[in-house]
């Protein structure tokens, strides 16, 4: 019998498991599957973990999410085509839920799919090497400290790429008397109340971690961008300046001449695609981009087409894109989709990579990734979802952020699955200090 290994049970791994489950429900004979998960539960980054560094077994902590994290895009843009928010929550809910609510939604679909029996929890994949046409996968049962090696015909890498921090070095760091941390280890903005916070970066972590610090009472928030500023209308108490030059004692000295006293430096400098368990020829090497090279249709490893990667792109689209990818990979494994020859694969990858490299602004990037999702879906039975509406939502969301970075999460969007419009939340995001599911779902 064909054997498939899935590495990780975050949203991507769960999409993969769901896709096989749906095929089985339709009467197809599916392969034997083992999904390895290093955490004690599924849900990937959507699990909150107080720990940083290593766990009780000495394994690295995967999680990068923090208290009070709310969705940074409308939930309608990531809705599963086969499991709506209305179906899960039994009532319409607002468009920008906090982490716990989105986790509940992801897990809700997984629970309904009878797939938990396929996941080995507390089990870290340590090595994957080519063996004939397949792979030898070695994984450690962390509780019993036992390494087991199993042969698989296919391996699906779904270990995420927002977990291993990229940590730059600046002059003066060793002598700085305050705290230096990466956003991967950020857990709770309350810690920085009344502090002078300096944040480096200009992407989503820089944006949200700085807003969190502002919201929960930091004295000042200074954001140092490297290439392009985010350029939002920051509220009083926040500012964006150009690039850190060096640190002198407790002073951050920026290239534009700004000198800022600081108590804490938070590096929102992004993450590394990191696959220490893969042998060299299988290893994807890329920065965070919309179309990493060597991946046919963004998922099939060009040099060994029995190896797949899910979710390795920079992401506007998330959960339904992961579904689109999973359904596509499933159908390759189940021989419903034929792969073209090597030359056609290379040409196809090149076309997408060239297109990506010509993109000039976020709107074009949204178009690009939407086209990509639609391209995958046309070949599978993933239920139809209105990607044109999702694209329009992303456009509106970009405009909302440009017009007011403090209120964009108070807006409402319509579901591409049910048409339901997200009701207004009882409390504006800026005033909502309690992010629990209970409070969020209650009507005041
Ligand atoms: C701070 C932060 C906030 C975000 N907020 C949003 C948001 O608001 N909306 C949104 O749509 N997306 C958001 N994202 C993007 C997020 O990446 C995706 O939503 C999603 O979690 C990606 O799913 P994944 O399965 O690819 O990876 P992950 O969620 O990272 O899951 C990977 C899984 O693989 C497991 N794993 C890793 N290595 C191994 C190994 N060697 N062996 C076994 N298991 C392993 C991990 O434990 C984990 O469970 C956010 C990301 C970050 C970092
Ligand atoms: N729900 C939420 O609110 C929320 C919050 C946080 C994160 N997220 C998600 O998390 C994911 C990761 O986002 P991310 O922002 O961590 O990573 P990212 O999007 O990959 O961005 C990395 C950033 O680091 C900057 N950088 C790298 N090296 C630097 C240096 N030496 N000095 C200054 N800046 C440097 C880059 O700047 P350049 O552009 O100059 O290269 C870039 O702005 C995204 O999918 C995002 O949606 C969501």
Image: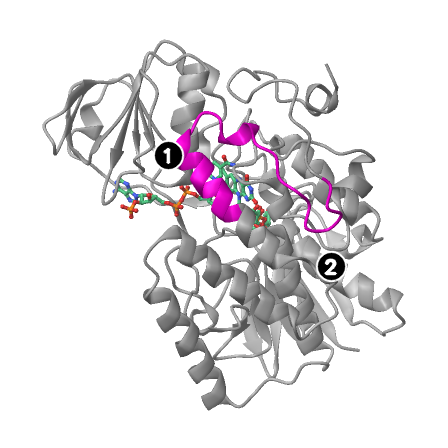
Residue 94, how many percent across, how many down? Answer: 66, 31
Number of callouts: 2
Q: Which residue is drawn at 45% across and 17% down?
A: 215
Q: Is residue 404 magenta?
A: yes
State whether residue 267 is above or below residue 361. above
Decide if residue 8 is on the left or right side of residue 344.
right
Q: Residue 17 carries which label?
A: 2
User: In the orientation shown, which residue stands out farthest toward the left?
Assistant: 257
State whether residue 61 is above or below residue 336. above
Q: Which residue is drawn at 36% across and 36% down?
A: 268
Q: Which residue is drawn at 47% across and 60% down?
A: 367
Decide if residue 236 is in sight here.
yes
Q: Mark 1 points at which residue?
A: 206
Q: Which quadrant of the figure has residue 41?
A: top right
Decide if residue 41 is on the left or right side of residue 163.
right
Helix, strand or loop status at disc 1: helix
Decide if residue 443 is on the left or right side of residue 179.
right
Q: Distance between the residues labelled 2 and 1?
A: 33 Å
Q: What quarter of the picture does the N terminus occupy?
A: bottom right
Q: Which quadrant of the figure has residue 401?
A: top left
Residue 418, how many percent across, how many down? Answer: 76, 47
Residues packed near mark 1 inside 10 Å, few (<14), some (14 to 19) or many (20 plus):
many
Helix, strand or loop status at disc 2: helix
Residue behind label 1 places its C-beta within 8 angstroms of ligand 2: yes
Q: Who is closer to the viewer here, 88 or 276?
A: 88
The span shown in magenta is 394-420
Q: What quarter of the picture does the C terminus occupy?
A: top right
């Amino acid at each position: 019998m064909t054997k498939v290994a899935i590495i990780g049970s975050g949203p991507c791994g769960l999409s993969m498991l769901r896709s096989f489950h749906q095929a089985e429900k339709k009467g197809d004979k599916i392969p034997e599957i083992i999904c390895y998960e290093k955490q004690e539960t599924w849900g990937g980054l959507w699990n909150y973990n107080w720990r940083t560094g290593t766990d009780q077994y000495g394994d690295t902590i995967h999680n990068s999410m923090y208290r009070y994290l709310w969705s940074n895009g409308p939930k309608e843009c990531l809705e599963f085509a086969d499991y709506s928010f209305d179906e899960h929550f039994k009532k319409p809910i607002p468009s920008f839920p906090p982490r716990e609510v989105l986790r509940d939604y992801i897990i809700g679909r997984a629970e309904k799919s009878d797939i938990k029996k396929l996941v080995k929890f507390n089990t870290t994949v340590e090595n994957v090497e080519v063996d004939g046409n397949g792979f030898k996968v070695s994984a450690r049962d962390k509780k019993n400290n036992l390494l087991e090696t199993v042969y698989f015909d296919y391996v699906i890498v779904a270990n995420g790429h927002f977990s291993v921090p990229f940590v730059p070095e600046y002059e003066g760091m060793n002598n700085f008397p305050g705290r230096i941390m990466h956003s991967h280890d950020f857990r709770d903005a309350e810690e920085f109340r009344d502090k002078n916070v300096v944040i480096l970066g200009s992407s989503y972590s820089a944006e949200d971690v700085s807003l969190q610090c502002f919201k929960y009472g930091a004295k000042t928030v200074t954001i140092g961008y490297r290439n392009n500023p985010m350029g939002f209308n920051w509220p009083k108490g926040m500012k964006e300046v150009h690039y850190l030059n060096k640190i002198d004692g407790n002073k951050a000295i920026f290239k534009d001449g700004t000198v800022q006293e600081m108590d804490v430096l938070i590096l929102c400098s992004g993450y590394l695609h990191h696959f220490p368990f893969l042998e060299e020829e299988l290893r994807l090497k890329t920065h965070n981009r919309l179309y990493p090279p060597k991946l046919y249709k963004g998922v099939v490893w060009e040099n060994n087409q029995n190896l797949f990667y899910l979710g390795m792109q920079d992401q506007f689209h998330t959960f339904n894109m992961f579904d689109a990818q999973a359904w596509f990979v499933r159908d390759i494994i189940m021989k419903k989709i034929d792969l073209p020859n090597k030359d056609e694969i290379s040409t196809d990858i090149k076309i997408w990579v060239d297109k990506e490299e010509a993109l000039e602004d976020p709107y074009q990037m949204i178009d690009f990734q939407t086209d990509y999702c639609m391209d995958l879906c046309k070949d599978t039975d993933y239920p139809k979802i209105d990607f044109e509406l999702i694209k329009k939502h992303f456009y509106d969301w970009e405009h909302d952020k440009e017009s007011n970075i403090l209120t964009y999460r108070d807006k409402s969007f319509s579901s591409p699955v049910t048409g339901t419009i997200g009701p207004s939340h009882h409390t504006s995001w800026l005033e909502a200090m309690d992010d629990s599911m209970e409070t969020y779902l209650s009507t005041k």
